[in-house]
Image (tube, rainbow, N blue to C red):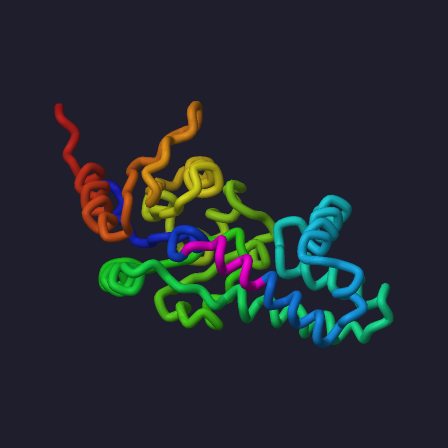
C-alpha cells in the first residue's frame, strides 16, 4: 500500500483570493503614505517608476529577486538615502504596503473548505508572494507557511517544495500541491515529484507542451473528492 496523503500545500494569490485588486490597492496605499510622509520621493516617482526601480534592483542583486519584501525594503532604504530621509521611514513605508497587501478577501468557499480539510490533513501555504497570513487573519488554517523569504528561492524551483517537506517531515508521495498557475504551481510540483491539482477557476486552456497536473478543479469544493480519488488509486492492489 502506498503512502497516505498527509499534507496539502496551497498556493495563495489567485488560489485563495483574487490577487490583482489586492496588489493594486497595496501599491496605491503605499504611494499615498509616501505622499504624506516622504513627499520628495513621491514628487520624483509614480507607482510605475517605483516598480521599475525594484525590477532593476532585482536584476542587479539576484539574491533579492525572489524575496519581494526584502527587495522593497532595500529599494526604499536607497530612496530614503537619495532624498535625505531617515531610513527608518522607509521601513514604515514598507509596513504600509504590507498592511494593505495582507488585506485580502478570500473566495467565498475558502473558510468552509480549509476548515473541513484540517480535520483530516495538515495544511501548508507555499507562495511566491509576500502576504502576511497573520495580518490577513488566515494563519489559523495552516500548520506551515513558507515563502521565498524562508527558502531563498521561488516556485517552480523544487527546493521550495523540498523545504516544506523537510519541515513537515513528509515524503513527496504524502503531499499534494494545489495552485492556479500551470508553471509555478504545477510544473514546480512535478519537479519536486509532488502531485499537483490545478485550480482552474476561469475555465482556461492548459498551456500547450506543458506537463499536466494529476487533477483539475474549478472550485476548492471539488478538492476533497479529488484527494479521495488519488488515495483510492494509490491504494489499489496491482493486478497479477
Question: Picture quarter containing residue 125?
Answer: bottom left
> Residue 216 location, x and y as percent?
29, 39
Taking the image as shown, residue 218 lies to the left or right of residue 74, namely: left
Q: Nearer the viewer, residue 140 or 208?
A: 208
Judge whether residue 158 can be spotted in this image: yes
Taking the image as shown, residue 164 lies to the left or right of residue 114, namely: right
State the residue at coordinates (74%, 47%): 56
> Residue 64 location, x and y as percent?
68, 52
State the residue at coordinates (82%, 73%): 85
Judge whether residue 63 can be spotted in this image: no
State the residue at coordinates (77%, 71%): 39
On whether residue 24 falls in the magenta region, the answer is yes
Give the vertical position of 86 relative to 3 (above or below): below
- How many numbered marks are there? 0
State the residue at coordinates (74%, 52%): 53
**Magenta-tinted stretch:** 18-26
Residue extending furthest toward the front: 43
Taking the image as shown, residue 41 lies to the left or right of residue 126, namely: right
Magenta part, dominant SS: helix
Give the vertical position of 230 relative to 26 (above or below): above
Give the vertical position of 149 relative to 90 (above or below): above
Taking the image as shown, residue 179 lies to the left or right of residue 111, namely: right
Q: Which of the image's four quarters has the C terminus? A: top left
> Residue 214 location, x and y as percent?
31, 36
Amino acid at each position: 500500500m502506498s503512502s497516505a496523503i498527509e499534507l496539502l500545500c496551497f498556493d495563495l494569490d489567485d488560489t485563495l483570493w483574487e490577487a490583482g485588486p489586492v496588489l493594486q490597492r497595496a501599491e496605491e496605499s503605499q504611494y499615498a503614505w509616501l505622499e504624506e510622509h516622504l513627499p520628495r520621493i513621491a514628487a520624483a516617482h509614480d507607482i510605475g517608476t517605483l516598480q521599475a526601480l525594484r525590477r532593476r534592483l532585482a536584476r542587479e542583486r539576484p539574491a533579492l529577486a525572489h524575496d519581494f519584501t526584502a527587495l522593497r525594503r532595500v529599494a526604499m532604504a536607497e530612496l530614503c538615502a537619495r532624498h535625505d530621509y531617515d531610513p527608518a521611514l522607509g521601513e514604515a513605508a514598507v509596513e504600509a504596503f504590507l498592511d494593505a497587501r495582507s488585506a485580502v478577501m478570500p473566495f467565498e468557499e475558502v473558510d468552509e473548505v480549509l476548515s473541513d480539510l484540517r480535520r483530516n490533513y495538515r495544511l501548508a501555504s507555499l507562495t511566491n508572494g509576500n502576504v502576511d497570513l497573520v495580518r490577513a487573519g488566515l494563519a489559523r488554517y495552516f500548520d506551515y507557511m513558507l515563502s521565498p523569504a524562508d527558502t531563498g528561492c521561488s516556485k517552480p524551483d523544487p527546493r521550495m517544495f523540498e523545504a516544506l517537506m523537510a519541515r513537515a517531515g513528509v515524503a513527496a508521495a504524502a503531499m499534494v500541491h494545489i495552485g492556479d498557475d500551470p508553471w509555478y504551481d504545477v510544473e514546480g510540483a512535478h519537479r519536486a515529484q509532488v502531485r499537483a491539482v490545478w485550480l482552474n477557476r476561469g475555465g482556461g486552456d492548459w498551456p500547450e507542451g506543458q506537463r499536466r497536473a494529476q487533477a483539475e478543479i474549478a472550485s476548492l469544493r471539488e478538492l476533497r473528492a479529488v484527494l479521495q480519488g488519488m488515495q483510492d488509486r494509490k491504494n489499489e492492489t496491482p493486478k497479477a
